[in-house]
Image (cartoon, rainbow, N blue to C red):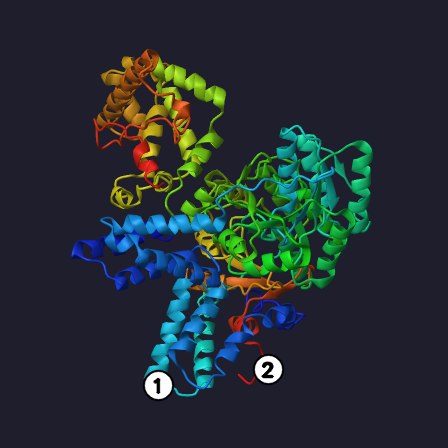
Amino acid sequence: MVFSRLFRRKSEPDVLLEQGLEKTRRGVFSEITRLFDRNALDDDLYEDLEMLLIQADVGWDVSQKLVAELRATVDRERIKDPADAREVLRQEMIELLELATRNRTVKILQRGVPFVIMVVGVNGVGKTTTIAKLAAYHQRFGRSVMLAAGDTFRAAAIDQLKVWGERRQVPVIAGPQNGDPGAVVFDAMAAAHARNVDVLIVDTAGRLHTKHNLMAELEKLRKIMVRHVETAPQEVLLVIDATTGQNGLVQAKEFAKSVTITDIMIAKLDGTAKGGIAFSVAKELGTPISYVGTGEKATDLAEFRPETYVDALFFGTGDGL
Amino acid sequence: MFESLSDRLTETLGRLGRKGRLTEDDVKEAMREVRRALLEADVNFKVTKDFVAAVQERAIGQDVLRSLTPAQTAIGIVHDELIAVLGAEREPLRIPERPPQIVMMVGLQGSGKTTHTGKLALHLRKENRNPLMVAADVYRPAAVNQLQALGKQVNIPVYDEGTTANPVDIATNAVRFARERGFNPIIVDTAGRLQIDERLMQELVDIRDKIKPTEILLVADAMTGQEAVGVAQAFNDRLGVTGLILTKMDGDARGGAALSIRAVTGVPIKFIGTGEKLDALEPFYPERLASRILGMGDILSLVERAQEQTDEGEAERLQDKMFKGQFDLEDFLAQLQKIKKMGPLTELLGMIPGLGAQLRQAKAEINDDDYKRIEAIIRSMTPKERRRPDIIQFSRRKRIARGSGTDAQEVGQLLTQFKEMQKMMGQFGAMAKKGKLPDLDGLEFGAPGMPQLPGHLNAPNRPARRPNPKKAKRRR
């Protein structure tokens, strides 16, 4: 858990996740549970399972691996009951996602030193909405929050952040449209210091990971932050849209090349997407997945938990598993 | 990135070819590779299944078994079938029987509706139309401001009623307003919504029933995974979508979602979005997407990236200079910077069709750090030296080497190569004058403004290589 060792949480995030994923659960993924209602563990079942995993954007490689492992375990332990095999699969999937939680580090908020979060991602993944959610999240712990409008490129991105700032009643540091995001970050760092802000959340323009000059800009922003606070940005959050297919992994890899990603958020899990990309990301990168986004409201943010994720999206809950 | 399908097929079928005869099982083995490649490109699972079945039938039925180049034949069949599904003909926007033409933009959150409303309006104005954009997204903070800002950028009016009005009323009033003022077409930007959000989907139906649009365009992100089909089907079932805009195609997503949507809904792809700038909207070419899904290299993207970095006047001036043999090290440095902005060299080379296999061998040799060394050397020269490299003799050479952290020999190599390049350019120019050269702009794959790089520093005298246009054409 990101802050739990140092700060007590006031709400129980799992409840939010479950509510947000309510709609999703009714989709393809109770089908996995139903799949194992069959009598025999035969080739058809494994084939159908692979299909369901791929349909959830788990990806070809990882799906193959999950199914092969399941088969091996079933053979080795002479499992006959499909319900037992289902539990094996469930554990396998949870373990895979735990690759994305075991590298979590405890982040420390120091009095008088702003905790800087830089939010990055490709266009349209929901960075600005995520920022509103993060602001609400930290406000719940009684921390003072400030936002920096680092997306000076997209039309009205600054206005959008200001609207959220007003709603959350937090100050927003902004420069002119098409201005230098570096200047905005510089001002915001100074302001955060001067006003003794606990958490500064920096918005950045959406950028496709193939645009090398834009990717290089992220490093420049980081350097500006470092000039004020040596450890900043303490959090670099990559937002990935749950609807994204296999390109999500490419995104994560490419962003990681330009700037050290400390946390990943899987956004838009309130739709029908299963967020299967989390498995590839966990397996290939091991970068901590820390949050999930489950709606358009500022409170629709939950901490990422492998077990909840797997149960809510793939198995449904309360079915005796 | 994934290995490309064309490489894999070459490997599977090529290996088998040498064995002597291909059997049906060999082809089936190859089809597994096709299946995998499509799934990795995010083509929907069911669509992939049907597609592979069709390809397999054709492959076994005729061409591949008897072919001397089974891999090439198989790739050809896959490519053809992809185009068949994507739609061989490009479908333009519908023209209404009675004006005005009304276009409604719909889609999920973050797919790019507002940006593409602006792009489409600009596109239509270039056809001498008089478009009006309508801000009917009252939910997302500042969506109305965003459309207004885009309108201001391209000087196209935006109709809005703030964020307190009802989107159905806004759309209806906007159409009346447009009729009174003679605006045509009308492009209505709607809020992003989940296809399972009953209330918001009903809102779209209400807007549609009120304004009776000529065209309902679904805006979809090229990076979308398996859910693309479900989303498109839901929008199509409720609204009757007439076309698709595939956005963010300037990234490296394979765009399999487009294939799925087209195959399942039959909705034609009308445009693709290729960048954040408002003129980055292009008509859809099935051929290009087919090549991309197959990972067969993308020479056109390369050209696009080159164009992004070059303006025409500048390119002409440079060409002139090159042909006159006046191209100096300053120009060279400037060109180097531009190439750098286009991306790492290995990635650029990967876009050249047919170069995939060779590239893997060459990769060890090609090094982006070579750029840095060349840059450092040139930057250590005085402006005079850059303009007239001839004056660089022994002591200057030593100074430059010291300044750039290289040695005098490396500096010498660069100068020798540069001189050769200059000579070649001069000859090129002379030939062009005599009319021996084809018109460069007319070359199908000519990349404007792409300078020739001397080979890297450790291989003096190696002539600069240019992508062979014949190779590029082979993919057809």
**Dot 1 or dot 2, earlier in sequence:** 1
Residue position marked by numbered label 1 in the rendering: A77
In the image shown, does B162 or B381 lie closer to the viewer? B162
Tell me the quarter of the picture where residue A77 sits.
bottom left
Asked whether B335 or A183 is in front, the reply is B335
In the figure, is residue B302 to the left or right of A198? left
Residue B135 placed where, x, y %? 74, 44
The chain containing the residue under callout 2 comes to A
- Seen in the image, is B390 located left or right of residue A132? left
What residue is shown with label 2?
Answer: A318
Q: Residues within 10 Å of mark 1 (few under 14, many from 20)?
A: few
Residue at 25% of width from left, 22% of height from top?
B398
Tags 1 and 2 on a common chain: yes
> Which residue is located at x 38 percent, y 27 percent?
B443
- Measuring from the top left, give residue A309's x and y in whole percent: 54, 70
The answer to whether residue B31 is visible is: yes
Residue B465 occupies quadrant: top left
Tag 1 secondary structure: loop
Q: State whether residue B129 is above or below residue A78.
A: above
Residue A194 x, y percent position in the rendering: 66, 46
Amino acid under disc 1: Glu
- The chain letter for the residue carrying disc 1 is A
Which of the pair B375/B463 is nearer the observer? B463
